Image (cartoon, helix red, strand yellow):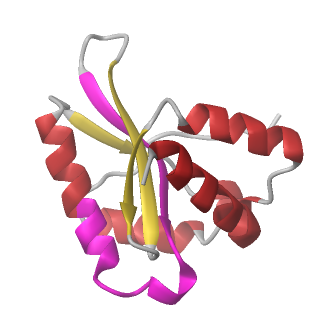
C-alpha cells in the first residue's frame, strides 16, 4: 500500500475517533502527513514520524501520530510499536525520540503514565492564551 493510500485510510478513522477534523484541517493533515514516514500495523494502528536534524544539530525523531484502534488498546501492539519506533530512530541516526502529548487532554494522565513506564520523561509546558 502506498503512503498516500495509508493516509487516506487512517485520517478519517482518527478524525472520527477523537480529532474531528473540519475539511480544511483534514486537507492540511493529509498534506502534512505526506512529509512524514509512515508505518501501518495491519488494520490495528498506524504511526507517523519524522527524523530531522534539530536547530542544535542533533538528530531527533518526532512522533507526529501514534494511533491504535480502541479495540486493540491494551494488547501487545503498543509495545510492538514502541520497540519498532526505537529501532527505526536508531537506524535513522536519532539521539532522542520526542512523543508529544495527547490531543486536547485526551486521556492525558493514562498517556503519560504509559510512556513513562517505557522510559520516556515528561517535559514541557503548555499555556493557553
Quarter of the figure that contains the N terminus: bottom left
- Which residue is more in the foreground, 58 or 90? 90
Give the residue at x 52% y 89%: 71
Residue 78 magenta-drawn?
A: yes
Q: Indicate left or right for 28 with 126 as reference.
A: right
Picture residue at 85% right of the left edge, 38% below the top:
24
Establish if 80 lies above or below 28: below
Q: Nearer the viewer, residue 116 or 80?
A: 80
Q: Is residue 35 above or below residue 8?
A: above
Q: Quadrant of residue 55?
A: top left
Does 70 appear in magenta? Answer: yes
76 and 2: which is toward the camera: 2
The vertical placement of 41 against 20, above or below, is below
Q: Is residue 68 left or right of residue 92?
A: right
Q: Position of residue 81 (x, y in %)?
A: 29, 64
How many numbered markers are drawn?
0
Q: Quadrant of residue 79?
A: bottom left
Where are the magenta residues, as a range? Answer: 59-82
The percent coordinates of residue 99 (x first, y second) are 41, 48
Instruction: Tell me where residue 38 appears, x and y as whole percent.
Output: 40, 47
Amino acid at each position: 500500500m502506498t503512503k498516500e493510500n495509508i493516509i487516506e485510510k487512517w485520517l478519517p478513522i482518527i478524525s472520527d475517533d477523537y480529532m474531528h477534523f473540519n475539511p480544511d484541517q483534514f486537507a492540511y493533515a493529509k498534506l502534512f502527513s505526506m512529509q512524514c514516514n509512515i508505518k501501518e500495523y495491519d488494520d490495528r494502528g498506524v504511526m507517523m514520524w519524522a527524523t530531522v536534524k534539530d536547530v542544535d544539530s542533533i538528530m531527533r525523531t518526532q512522533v507526529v501520530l501514534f494511533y491504535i484502534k480502541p479495540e486493540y488498546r491494551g494488547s501487545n501492539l503498543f509495545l510492538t510499536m514502541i520497540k519498532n519506533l526505537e529501532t527505526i530512530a536508531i537506524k535513522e541516526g536519532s539521539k532522542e525520540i520526542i512523543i508529544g502529548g495527547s490531543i486536547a487532554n485526551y486521556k492525558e494522565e493514562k498517556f503519560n503514565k504509559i510512556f513513562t513506564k517505557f522510559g520516556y520523561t515528561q517535559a514541557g509546558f503548555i499555556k493557553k492564551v
